[in-house]
Image: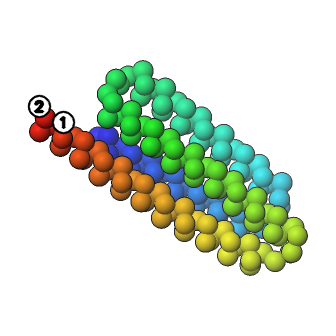
């Protein structure tokens, strides 16, 4: 269950990044809309993360679950920050150089890096959870 939650949240984070990047690519000329989109996404993500953490902390008093929640929150926050940076960089690039191709290249590279990082983090978390659960079971 805990692993499922971690993977789902990480997947959601990846989806968020992809959606934002698509929006960036589509809304090439309209900088204001782009900025609004970024702000909305960030607000939504932060609110969701906060709600999830509060609920988990109140409902569950399991150290295992708390670890997962912390990692998931970190992943989501990192993704949000990267998305903002991507949009800002792409917008700045477009405004300064009027070369959207270059901006898109930058965005794609950053997104690939983020996705890889998120996947790695999720895998590591799952491994840690499995190891800890095994140790706890063996210990008992």
Q: Residue 20: x, y in percent?
A: 64, 58
| Residue at 57% across, 50% down | 78
- Label 2's element? loop
Q: Residue 37: x, y in percent?
A: 72, 51
Residue corresponding to mark 2: 140
Task: Inspect this view and state whether residue 27 appears.
Answer: no
Q: Quarter of the image for the C terminus: give it.
A: top left
Residue corresponding to mark 1: 136
Question: In the rendered picture of this protein, how many numbered marks are placed on residues?
Answer: 2
Q: Quarter of the image for the N terminus: give it.
A: top left
Residue 59 placement, left or right of 31 = left
Instruction: Name above or below for residue 117 compared with residue 53.
Output: below
| Residue at 86% across, 75% down | 98
Task: Tell me where residue 11 sits by quadrant.
Answer: bottom left
Q: Residue 76: x, y in percent?
A: 53, 47
Task: Inspect this view and state whether residue 6 appears.
Answer: yes
Front position in the image: 106 or 104: 106
Asked if the residue under mark 2 is in contact with the one under mark 1, i.e. CB atoms within 8 Å, the reply is yes
- Label 1's element? helix
Instruction: Name above or below for residue 57 compared with residue 71.
Output: above
Front position in the image: 137 or 30: 137
Residue 90 placement, left or right of 113 = right
Residue 106 placement, left or right of 10 = right
Label 2 Cα neighbours within 10 Å, binned few <14 / some 14-19 / many ≥20:
few
Q: Residue 119: x, y in percent?
A: 43, 59
Instruction: Name above or below for residue 37 compared with residue 1.
Output: below
């Amino acid at each position: 269950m805990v692993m499922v939650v971690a993977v789902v949240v990480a997947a959601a984070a990846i989806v968020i990044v992809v959606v934002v990047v698509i929006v960036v690519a589509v809304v090439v000329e309209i900088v204001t809309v782009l900025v609004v989109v970024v702000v909305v996404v960030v607000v939504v993500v932060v609110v969701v993360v906060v709600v999830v953490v509060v609920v988990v902390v109140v409902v569950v008093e399991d150290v295992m679950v708390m670890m997962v929640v912390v990692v998931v929150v970190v992943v989501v926050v990192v993704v949000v920050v990267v998305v903002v940076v991507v949009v800002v960089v792409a917008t700045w690039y477009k405004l300064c150089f009027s070369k959207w191709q270059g901006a898109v290249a930058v965005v794609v590279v950053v997104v690939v890096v983020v996705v890889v990082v998120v996947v790695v983090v999720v895998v590591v978390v799952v491994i840690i959870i499995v190891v800890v659960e095994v140790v706890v079971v063996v210990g008992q």
